[in-house]
Image: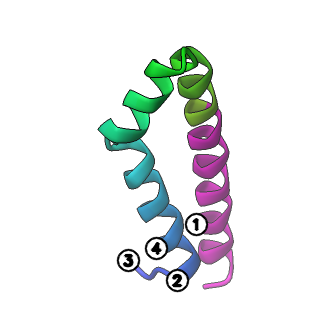
Amino acid sequence: MNTNPRIDALQLMLTDLRTRNEPIRHKAAFRGCQPEFQTLVSKLIEQLEMELLKEKQQLRQNK
């Protein structure tokens, strides 16, 4: 499959967000904001998934 640098970057960002980053999660839990932190991560993942889908659709249309 043909890709472009933007698609690669979006996929890497999504992989990074889905990977548990224990030091950051520990800080969020310590400060009492774990639910808010997880909500923000979930929203960001949704936005990035939509952006990735758009990029893939544009790539297919430009073939």
- Give me the C-alpha separation between circle 2 and circle 3: 13 Å
Question: What residue is shown at x 62% (from left), y 20% (from top)?
Answer: 36
Q: Amino acid at mark 2?
A: Pro
Residue type indicated by callout 4: Asp
The residue where tag 3 is placed is 1
Which dot, 3 or 4, sits closer to the camera?
4
Q: Under tag 3, what secondary structure?
A: loop
Task: Indicate which label's residue lies in the foreground, 1 or 4.
Answer: 4
Mark 3 to mark 4: distance in Å?
A: 12 Å
Please determine whether, in this image, residue 11 is positioned above or below residue 41: below
Say which of marks 2 and 3 sits in front: 2
Residue at 56% in and 42% down: 45
**The label number, if any, that marks residue 8 in the structure image:** 4
SS assignment for the magenta stretch, majority: helix
Q: Which residues are magenta?
A: 43-63
Q: Which residue is mark 1?
A: 56
Q: Residues within 10 Å of mark 4 (few under 14, many from 20)?
A: few
Q: CA distance from mark 1 to mark 4?
A: 11 Å
Q: Which image quarter: residue 60?
A: bottom right
Q: Secondary structure at mark 4?
A: helix
- The alpha-carbon separation of the residues under discs 2 and 1 comes to 12 Å
Residue 13 % position (x, y): 48, 59
- Local SS, label 1: helix
Name the one closer to the observer, 31 or 46. Answer: 31
Is tag 1's residue or tag 4's residue first in the polypeptide sequence? 4
* Residues marked 2 and 4 touching at CB (< 8 Å): yes
Q: Earlier in the sequence, mark 3 or mark 4?
A: 3
Q: Which residue is mark 2?
A: 5
Distance Cα–Cα, label 3 vs label 1: 10 Å
